[in-house]
Image (cartoon, rainbow, N blue to C red):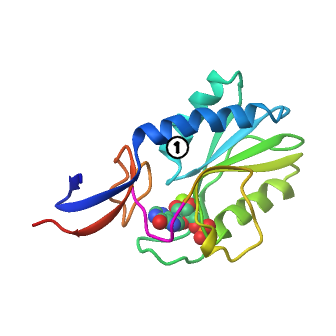
Amino acid sequence: MPIVRGRNIEVLFSAETIARRNLELAEEIAAREFHDLLVIAILKGSFIFAADLIRCMHGAGLAPEVEFILISSYGAGTKSGGIRILRDIDASVEGRDVLLIDDILESGNTLAYTRHLALNRGARSVSIAVLLDKRGRRQLDIEAQFVGFACPDRFVVGYGMDVAHTFRELPFVGVVTEQEG
Ligand code: IMP
Ligand code: MG
């Protein structure tokens, strides 16, 4: 088990497993024939997933525009709170097919909020790609069209995801277990 910051990390999805799934996701996205595609990565948690997925999308023949929105939903803890836009996108979404990329779909609050935002601004369609789907935690009626993996109901870190701003650098997704030795 990898040890980081003196904590054991149980690996749930390895770097190799994620890389293979990203290639498949990109093919699934390419098969949809989106028009004037604008990808919006929801920061901060999606930054590694988005970086890998959009490169796989290039490999699948896509040439999307890429934007970033910085949304705060958790603060530094692990409980869901209010949603705020800390940094908005610059591009217009009017008449375009938008693909939102996020790390986890959990309650659905973050993605429902961002989806409404894009639709209210005139997006032609809004689709959602997430690395992980924590379906058991859903509070709103929202689904992702592209899902990397179903996620067990555990707090995961790595591959961009954090607990109190730590562990984002891990190249895999894991769960922090007990203190080491
Ligand atoms: P939702 O708004 O409840 O769907 O939460 C989605 C956001 O919460 C994600 O974009 C993540 O940033 C964060 N989140 C939810 N579950 C986890 C987790 O297990 N680890 C790290 N971040 C999480
Ligand atoms: Mg997030």
Q: Is mark 1 within 8 Å of ligand 1?
A: no
Q: Residue 113's spot in the image, x, y percent?
A: 72, 65
| Quarter containing the C terminus | bottom left
* Residue at x 77%, y 49% (from the top left corner): 127
* Residue at x 85%, y 40% (from the top left corner): 96
Q: Can you name the residue that lies furthest to the left here?
A: 181
Up-down relation of residue 5 to residue 73 (above or below): above
Along the horizontal axis of the image, is 148 left or right of 9? right
Along the horizontal axis of the image, is 97 left or right of 133? right
- The number of numbered badges drawn on the structure is 1
15, 36: nearer the viewer: 15
136, 59: nearer the viewer: 136
The magenta stretch is 151-157
124, 31: nearer the viewer: 31
* Residue at x 81%, y 44% (from the top left corner): 93
Q: Residue 60's spot in the image, x, y percent?
A: 67, 24
Along the horizontal axis of the image, is 89 left or right of 170? right
Q: Is residue 83 visible?
A: no
Label 1 Cα neighbours within 10 Å, binned few <14 / some 14-19 / many ≥20: many
Up-down relation of residue 100 to residue 59 (above or below): below
* Residue at x 36%, y 61% (from the top left corner): 165
Q: Is residue 80 visible?
A: yes
Amino acid type of disc 1? Phe
The residue pinned by badge 1 equals 49
Residue 119 is drawn in which quadrant? bottom right
Label 1 SS = helix
Instruction: Give the main secondary structure of the magenta stretch.
Output: loop
